[in-house]
Image: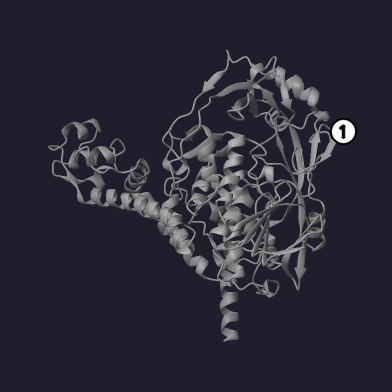
């Protein structure tokens, strides 16, 4: 049996869902192939979306009509905006989700796309012809042909679960078989493969928890939605609970450390530095008196709780002992043990900036296969792979996001330029332009591009125009409107500033930290000015209040664009450029950067190397002419 498609997506997780959706929105005939259709959109670990930098990625994906934002809005059972006491560059939306509702929402959103077909099948091998991919063969013998294939296999490639040093289970995650055959084929094709590990904590029955001494954490901002394209009603809301792993837990872990898969020698792979196991916390931070633990609801239809902060690879019986040493969990019933999982990933410097495998035309990788960790990082890569798989098969120039365009651009550039030596996770600190790349302006940054590419429906285009028009109207009014102390004495006096007696523009006044744009314009035009959405007010105020800082960041971004415009051919003979250091020649030969800016971010390539590289390239261009 043969069936023909434009794009085949292998894997139905967060990367696969976005890849399939993006390709379908561009008009491609898409096949989403997964070993179990019931687990499309499955949250394998923490049932939460967003967080530091990650929440901004969700909003960036949403600007292209993405899946994750809409699924999160339909399943949010607690929402918080992190870092509100800090500047807007690091504000971070985070939603605790109902795991079942989220999964069902993803499937429903994908099924709204008529161009997406679904097949429950395990990929056994890529079909190749003359160095390019032309389809996929399933384990049951069926063949599906296509012009492009996107692999988003998550932790399934030769995945192996570890609980203690003696229990090892081949699995992509608990309850699902790993993908062996296609992993072996990819390695046989000469691709550089490595092994990473990640983990998950135990789950417990919430009915067995003593909540009396725990700190309750309720949600906030009931009006906030990740998606700009719809005000979905939220389900019922639920609290989280905070407790601590203290000295008793540390003692138990130290007594059983050699029984841990990680410290007992069963696992040698690197894990995520910023999401460590509780064993890592105890060993690497011995002076810490205690470690915070969050009890997070799994959903509305279950009492089960996710024990965030106790990720572990200890044997199940030790996990129970450890749980009972946590305040409030003295009688807790463990419903599922935590575990560590090892899996294959492929060095991402083998990819182009549009996530196509350099050695195999038409083959794209997205998600944990590229050495990343996190649902949001996977979603961002899925979007890039989905868009560019379609553009490549249509022989159109690929879309590459710059570092000043969005966190997705930072993510992909870091991967393909620097590679990974541990599971990669996004942070605001990874961006040079984080004041430009805020969660509130993601639609403004990427919405026009999504519209240009034809990825938005007529209704979504209407939302985009309305939202950006509102912000522009507010900003324009602030620049044109004037206000004096005599006109609003209480407002300006309460600000604690000596405002000039003569009228000043609202745009100038709002730069004072104690003044609100909405209040200032209300004083000029009356309280009925608008009406405008809260999002439009927030973005407009940030743009005006931080105008000087934003201008400096834009200047720096423009300089980066100038460097990026100095292109580097893929076939440059770096090994022959003797003016470069040996390390620079080796790193440039391995990475094959597309621009001088990208070359400058390769570890080991110095400013002197960059200067000499410019001379070498100019000399070769002159000789060729």
The single residue placed furthest to the front in the displayed view is: 1
- The answer to whether residue 543 is left or right of residue 302 is left
Q: Quadrant of residue 416?
A: bottom right
The single residue placed furthest to the top in the displayed view is: 212
Q: Quadrant of residue 360?
A: bottom right
User: Residue at the spot x=65%, y=51% of the render?
Assistant: 367
Q: Position of residue 503 (x, y in %)?
A: 15, 45
Q: Position of residue 228 (x, y in %)?
A: 43, 47
Q: Which residue is at the front of the view, 12 or 193?
A: 12
Q: Quadrant of residue 167?
A: top right
Q: Does residue 202 lie above or below 2 as drawn? A: above
Q: Does residue 195 lie above or below 598 as drawn? A: above
Q: Position of residue 601 (x, y in %)?
A: 59, 58
User: Residue at the spot x=84%, y=37% of the render?
Assistant: 168
- The answer to whether residue 439 is left or right of residue 547 is right
Q: Does residue 565 lie above or below 239 as drawn? A: below
Which residue in the protein does label 1 denote? 166
Can residue 30 be spotted in the picture?
yes
Q: Position of residue 317 (x, y in %)?
A: 80, 23
- The answer to whether residue 564 is left or right of residue 507 is right
The single residue placed furthest to the bottom in the displayed view is: 625
Can residue 47 be spotted in the picture?
no
User: Residue at the spot x=61%, y=73% of the render?
Assistant: 569
């Amino acid at each position: 049996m043969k069936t023909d498609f434009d794009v085949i997506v292998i894997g139905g997780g967060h990367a696969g869902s976005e890849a399939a959706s993006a390709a379908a929105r561009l008009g491609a005939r898409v096949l989403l192939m997964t070993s179990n259709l019931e687990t499309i959109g499955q949250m394998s670990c923490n049932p939460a979306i967003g967080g530091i930098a990650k929440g901004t990625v969700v909003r960036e994906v949403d600007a292209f009509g993405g899946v994750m934002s809409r699924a999160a809005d339909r399943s949010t059972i607690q929402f918080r905006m992190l870092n509100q006491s800090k500047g807007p560059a690091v504000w971070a939306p985070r939603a605790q989700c109902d795991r079942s509702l989220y999964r069902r929402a993803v499937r429903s959103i994908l099924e709204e796309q008529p161009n997406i077909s679904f097949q429950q099948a395990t990929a056994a091998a890529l079909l190749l012809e003359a160095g390019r991919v032309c389809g996929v063969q399933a384990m049951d013998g069926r063949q599906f042909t296509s012009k492009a294939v996107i692999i988003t296999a998550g932790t399934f490639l030769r995945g192996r679960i570890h609980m203690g040093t003696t229990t090892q289970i081949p699995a992509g995650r608990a309850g699902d078989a790993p993908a062996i055959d296609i992993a072996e084929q990819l390695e046989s094709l000469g691709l550089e493969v490595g092994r990473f590990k990640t983990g998950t904590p135990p789950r417990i029955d919430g009915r067995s928890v003593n909540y009396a001494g725990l700190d309750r954490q309720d949600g906030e901002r009931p009006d906030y939605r990740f998606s700009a394209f719809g005000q979905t009603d939220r389900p019922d809301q639920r609290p989280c609970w905070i407790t601590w792993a203290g000295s008793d837990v540390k003692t138990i872990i130290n007594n059983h450390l050699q029984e841990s898969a990680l410290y007992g020698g069963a696992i040698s792979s690197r894990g995520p530095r910023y999401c460590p196991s509780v064993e890592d916390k105890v060993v690497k931070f011995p002076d810490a008196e205690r470690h915070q633990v969050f009890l997070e609801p799994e959903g509305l239809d279950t009492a089960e709780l996710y024990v965030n902060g106790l990720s572990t690879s200890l044997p199940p019986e030790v996990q129970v002992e450890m749980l009972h040493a946590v305040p409030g969990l003295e009688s807790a019933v463990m419903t599922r043990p935590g575990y560590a999982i090892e899996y294959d990933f492929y060095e991402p410097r083998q990819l182009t900036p549009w996530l196509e495998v350099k050695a195999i035309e038409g083959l794209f990788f997205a998600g944990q296969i590229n050495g990343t960790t996190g649902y949001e990082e996977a979603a961002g890569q899925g979007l890039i792979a989905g868009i560019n798989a379609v553009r490549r098969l249509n022989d159109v120039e690929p879309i590459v996001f710059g570092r000043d365009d969005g966190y997705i651009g930072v993510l992909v550039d870091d991967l393909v330029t620097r590679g990974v030596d541990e599971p990669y996770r996004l942070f605001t600190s990874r961006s040079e332009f984080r004041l430009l790349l805020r969660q509130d302006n993601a639609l403004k940054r990427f919405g026009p591009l999504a519209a240009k590419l034809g990825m938005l429906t007529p209704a979504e285009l209407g939302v985009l125009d309305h939202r950006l028009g509102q912000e522009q109207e507010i900003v324009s009014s602030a620049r044109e409107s004037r206000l004096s102390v005599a006109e609003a004495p209480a407002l300006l006096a309460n600000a604690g500033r000596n405002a000039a007696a003569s009228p000043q523009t609202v745009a100038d006044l709002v730069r004072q930290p104690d003044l609100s744009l909405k209040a200032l314009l209300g004083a000029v035009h009356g309280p009925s000015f608008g009406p405008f959405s809260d999002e439009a007010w927030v973005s407009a105020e940030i743009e005006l209040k931080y105008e000087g800082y934003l201008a400096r960041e834009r200047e720096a971004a423009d300089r980066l664009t100038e460097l990026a415009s100095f292109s580097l051919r893929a076939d440059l003979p770096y090994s022959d450029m003797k003016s470069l250091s040996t390390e620079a020649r080796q790193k440039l030969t391995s990475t094959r950067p597309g621009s001088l800016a990208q070359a400058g971010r390769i570890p080991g390539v110095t400013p002197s190397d960059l200067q000499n590289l410019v001379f070498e390239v100019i000399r070769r261009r002159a000789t060729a002419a």
